[in-house]
Amino acid sequence: MDTSGKIIQLLGVQTGQGKNGTWKKQEFILETADAYPKKICIAVWGDKIDMSQFRIGDSVQVSFDVESREYNGRWYTDVKAWKVVSGANAGGAPAPEFNGPIDPVHDDDLPF
């Protein structure tokens, strides 16, 4: 899934030791750019995404997975990012395609 919005909070890096070794997680709060903005807590696991390149107020587009798990009769849901893109293309609009340079000699060859 994908969503876009503005980073409104960067939470601290958490580390720990699990049965598969050391783990690292950082969460951030994204405010969506919808008509009725929502706040989403999104986790980044491991070193795949360097969150130090982002600042509060940055517009980003996030690709993520949603996963729920049960523990002692309660359900917990995680939103895990697998890609975070910043900049002008983060508003949800696709990047313009480049079709090569315009030939100024022939750009006025219109049939009308």
Image (cartoon, grey):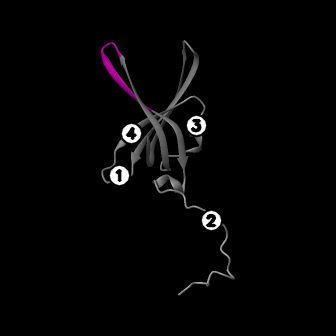
What is the distance, in whole Å, between disc 3 and disc 1 at their CAs? 25 Å
Identify which amino acid the numbered label 1 is placed on.
Answer: Asp
Residue situated furthest front in the rendering: 111
Residue holding disc 3 = 49
Taking depth in this image into account, of 108 and 13 the one nearest to the observer is 108
> Residue 109's quadrant in the figure?
bottom right
Q: Secondary structure at mark 2?
A: loop
Taking depth in this image into account, of 102 and 87 the one nearest to the observer is 102
Residue plotted at (30% across, 14% down): 73
Residue plotted at (42% across, 43% down): 30
Identify which amino acid the numbered label 3 is placed on.
Answer: Ile
What is the distance, in whole Å, between disc 4 and disc 1 at their CAs? 12 Å
Q: Secondary structure at mark 1?
A: loop
> Residue 52's quadrant in the figure?
top right
What is the distance, in whole Å, between disc 3 and disc 2 at their CAs? 31 Å
Indicate which disc, 2 or 4, sits on the residue closer to the N terminus: 4
Q: Quadrant of the N terminus?
A: top left
Residue holding disc 2 = 99
Residue 9 colored in magenta in the image:
no
Indicate which disc, 4 or 1, sits on the residue closer to the N terminus: 1
Q: Position of residue 31 (x, y in %)?
A: 39, 46
Q: Position of residue 46 (x, y in %)?
A: 57, 28
Figure label count? 4
Residue holding disc 1 = 34
Q: Position of residue 40 (x, y in %)?
A: 39, 39
What is the distance, in whole Å, between disc 3 and disc 4 at their CAs? 18 Å
The 10 Å Cα crowd at callout 4, few under 14, some 14 to 19, many 20 or more, is: some
Q: Which mark is residue 40?
A: 4
Indicate which disc, 3 or 1, sits on the residue closer to the N terminus: 1
Residue plotted at (62% across, 65% down): 99
The 10 Å Cα crowd at callout 3, few under 14, some 14 to 19, many 20 or more, is: some
Q: Secondary structure at mark 4?
A: strand
